[in-house]
Image: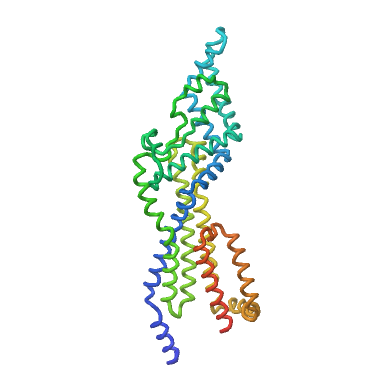
């Protein structure tokens, strides 16, 4: 190696921070990105009543979930009402002894009938209204906002009240108004959050919610610091950032899959109940999946950009092809690149323009990358 080569290598080494610092910043940024993904999911899906109600409508449209709800509603009706006794009072004396047998025989047809009823507009309205009411209370509890008087009727727990669906079911299967009106107040009640878990959930939400405005900035700042400190090896640092971001998305995706599987296993019974729980967990974490896929796509794009500005023969040929468009025609460069940028955002789930400041950050980063690419093409 010549003296000039050794001097250049030494200068590059002095210009670069120690590798462990750069890698530590990238790892810290990636961990923060995973936390930020969870925070966005909590903020935009878990704590958004409109999103919750929309997801609940997807639950009801799913056959496995609807079957589980039908079984639950029929069980609630049979537990609250002695259907055999009700039938006995209506049957002729000569066959009233068959009331118990008929009540048992009617259970499966009643479940099938309820399944069909759940597809009706009336039942869908009752289901959505129950979910909206429950989620509004849940958010108020977690954020400690609004009136919490409704908790006093449920022993301090947040519940989904499906009593009106059970009463509607009773009328549909022919129970008298006297029997339906006598159903207990807690019929059809599903506990969403136990009272002893409320404090922990409140603490988690109060910690996560304020972070939404700063986590993305922190992630970008940490990745940016790692790239800046890489000195003349910034291209390699950009590639590592892209790979790390893609891996963060993959970790979130795997974590979501494990959480969905754990939800299925947490259901005590087998078959319909477990399948319904898995479907509900999958629908409820759709946004988290989209964020993970988006992170993987953005990471792959960043790593691809690092390769594009690299020394490989393929990258050089691509840059030569792009030079007439991106350097000699600036207007075409900006308009064409902007159109591609928007198209990619359209294709990638969880696009960043949910808030104007996030959108500005992404547009700014895209503009910086395009300017750097044009400078590279000029230098070539």
Residue beneath the point at 53% across and 66% down: 300
Q: Residue 190: name its quadrant.
A: top left
Residue 56 x %, y %: 53, 42
Q: Is residue 271 left or right of residue 218?
A: right
Given residues 99 and 121, the one toward you in this image is: 121
**337 displayed left or right of 134:** right
Q: Where does residue 154 sit, x and y in percent of width and height?
A: 39, 34
Q: Work out whether residue 163 or residue 287 is closer to the camera in this orientation and state it.
A: 163
Q: Which quadrant is the C terminus positioned in?
A: bottom right
* Image quadrant occupied by the N terminus: bottom left
Residue 33 vertical placement versus 275 (above, below): below
Above or below, comparing residue 49 to residue 120 in the picture: below
Q: Residue furthest front?
A: 147
Q: Residue furthest top?
A: 94
Q: Position of residue 229 (x, y in %)?
A: 41, 76
Farthest residue to the bottom: give it. Answer: 3
- Colour logic: rainbow
Q: Nearer the viewer, residue 220 or 363?
A: 363
Q: List x then y, in percent, for residue 124.
A: 57, 36
Exactly how many numbered labels are in the figure? 0
């Amino acid at each position: 190696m010549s003296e000039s080569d050794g001097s250049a290598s030494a200068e590059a080494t002095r210009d670069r921070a120690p590798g462990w610092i750069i890698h530590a910043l990238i790892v810290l940024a990636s961990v923060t990105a995973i936390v930020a993904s969870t925070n966005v999911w909590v903020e935009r899906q878990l704590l958004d009543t409109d999103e919750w109600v929309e997801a609940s409508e997807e639950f009801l449209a799913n056959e496995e979930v609807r079957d589980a709800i039908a079984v639950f509603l029929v069980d609630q009706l049979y537990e609250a009402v002695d259907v055999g006794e009700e039938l006995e009072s209506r049957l002729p004396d000569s066959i009233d002894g068959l009331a118990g047998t008929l009540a048992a025989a009617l259970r499966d047809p009643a479940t099938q009938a309820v399944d069909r009823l759940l597809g009706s507009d009336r039942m869908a309205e009752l289901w959505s209204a129950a979910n909206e009411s429950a989620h509004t209370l849940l958010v108020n509890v977690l954020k400690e906002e609004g009136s919490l008087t409704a908790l006093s009727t449920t022993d301090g727990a947040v519940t989904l009240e499906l009593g009106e669906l059970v009463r509607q079911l009773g009328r549909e299967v022919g129970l008298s108004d006297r029997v339906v009106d006598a159903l207990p107040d807690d019929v059809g009640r599903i506990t969403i959050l136990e009272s002893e878990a409320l404090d922990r959930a409140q603490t988690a939400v109060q910690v996560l919610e304020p972070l939404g405005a700063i986590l993305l900035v922190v992630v970008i700042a940490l990745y940016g610091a790692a790239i800046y400190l890489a000195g003349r090896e910034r291209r390699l640092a950009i590639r590592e950032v892209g790979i790390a971001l893609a891996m963060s998305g993959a970790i979130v995706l795997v974590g979501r899959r494990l959480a969905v599987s754990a939800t299925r296993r947490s259901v005590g019974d087998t078959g319909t109940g477990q399948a319904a729980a898995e479907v509900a967990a999958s629908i409820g974490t759709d946004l988290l999946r989209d964020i993970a896929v988006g992170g993987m796509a953005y990471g792959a794009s960043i790593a691809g950009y690092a390769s594009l500005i690299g020394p490989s023969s393929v990258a050089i040929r691509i840059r030569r092809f792009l030079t007439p468009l991106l350097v000699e025609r600036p207007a075409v460069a900006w308009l064409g690149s902007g159109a591609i940028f928007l198209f990619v955002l359209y294709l990638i789930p969880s696009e960043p323009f949910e808030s104007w400041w996030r959108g500005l950050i992404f547009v700014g980063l895209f503009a910086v990358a395009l300017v750097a690419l044009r400078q590279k093409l000029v230098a070539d």
